[in-house]
Amino acid sequence: MAGIYIHVPFCKTRCLYCDFYSTVNALLRQRYVDALCLELRMRHDYLKGELVKTVYLGGGTPTQLEPQQLVAIFDTLREVYGLEQVQEVTLEANPDDLTEEYVAFIRTLPINRLSIGVQTFDDKMLRLLQRRHTAQEARDAVRRCRKAGLKNISIDLIYGLPGQTEEMLLTDLETAFELYPQHLSTYHLTYEKGTPLYRLRQSGNVKEVSEEQSRRLYRVLTDTMKARNYVHYEISNFCRGSHYSRHNMGYWTGVPYLGCGPSAHSFDVVSREWNRPSLKDYVEGMEKGERPFEKETLTLSMRYNEYVMTGLRTLRGISLTKVAKEFGAHRLRYLFSMAAPHMQRGTLVRRNGCLRLTEEAFFVSDDIISDLMYVR
């Protein structure tokens, strides 16, 4: 199986915290769509015949595309890759784009999952983050999608916001629960260098929450989600029943995927390549039949490190059989030797042939995972 990721780099406005590649210049939208469809055709052999099971349109803001532009993309996907066997098609969306007319249009496409970027239901925080919607508009958008028959809905929330208390986070979560999403993605606010939010912190106009407060917020998050019967299947993701993100699980379990559009990454198990993060270069290059990209061949140690890094993000963890079979018995021995102190502390456990982090250790996962990296 395999996945396809499509990066749509357009945003109406830039959020304060975002460091993903995007642009507010809409003038190149049609040339981008034409270039994207050309790339999808040019690279039809990249996945080596693997059946495409998931498609994910992310950004940026995919809902900034006009209906006929999305139709052109799906027509190309259907023509080149076929969509009959695809299990999950996700569209990232901003609440303010989800008008009644746009939602009705979405229902005509093979989209069966929405990921809605709410971020918070606190209007003051939404203004700080320079989001385009209000809390009420977000609630209305989710209900509108539900009424239209879109049943698999994920809501994105950010925690660790400046000055956020446990009570504020609980209010966000309770408001989300009222909308009964099948999935919640919850990310701690990060201050990425080069973003306006980073500069505000540097100038003292915004204060980052303390590590101690971050831990308390994470505990509130995990306890509340568990009480509401959401499965904590990945560090930042929770779902009801089997409504996990199949596309993202592919990333975390080493499934090959094709990434199209500026800045999109592709992975074929033995190498990784990525399109350069420039819409102008992407469009002009594709129009000449010359895709602007870079490529890296992965050594066995690099592949091991990636598997450990991504696999330990998940509830299942990493398969010890796979480590031995694909990366060698000596790397399995290395893994056990480096994992031993963490297993003694109870932050790593061995279960059902897998090594995984305990839920309590998810918050400090970076430190543990770095200890397991193969550096010889």
Image (cartoon, grey):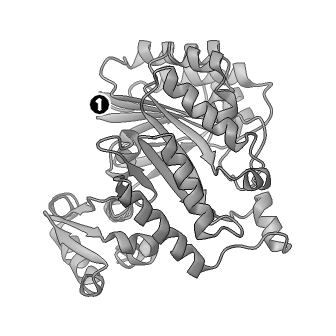
Residue 69 point in image, percent of width and height: 63, 16
Total of numbered circles in the picture? 1
State whether residue 43 is above or below residue 237: above
Q: Residue at x 30, y 22 (%)?
A: 85
- The quarter of the image holding the C terminus is bottom left
User: For residue 36, what is the image quadrant?
Assistant: top right
State whether residue 274 is above or below residue 355: above
User: For residue 225, what is the image quadrant?
Assistant: bottom left
In the image shown, does 121 or 131 lie closer to the viewer?
121
Q: Residue at x 38, y 74 (%)?
A: 361
Query: Does residue 261 appear in this view?
Result: no
Q: Residue at x 70, y 41 (%)?
A: 22
Residue 187 located left or right of residue 137: left
Residue 273 point in image, percent of width and height: 49, 45
Look at mark 1 in the image and give the residue it sits on.
50
User: For residue 182, what is the image quadrant?
Assistant: top left
- The quarter of the image holding the N terminus is top left
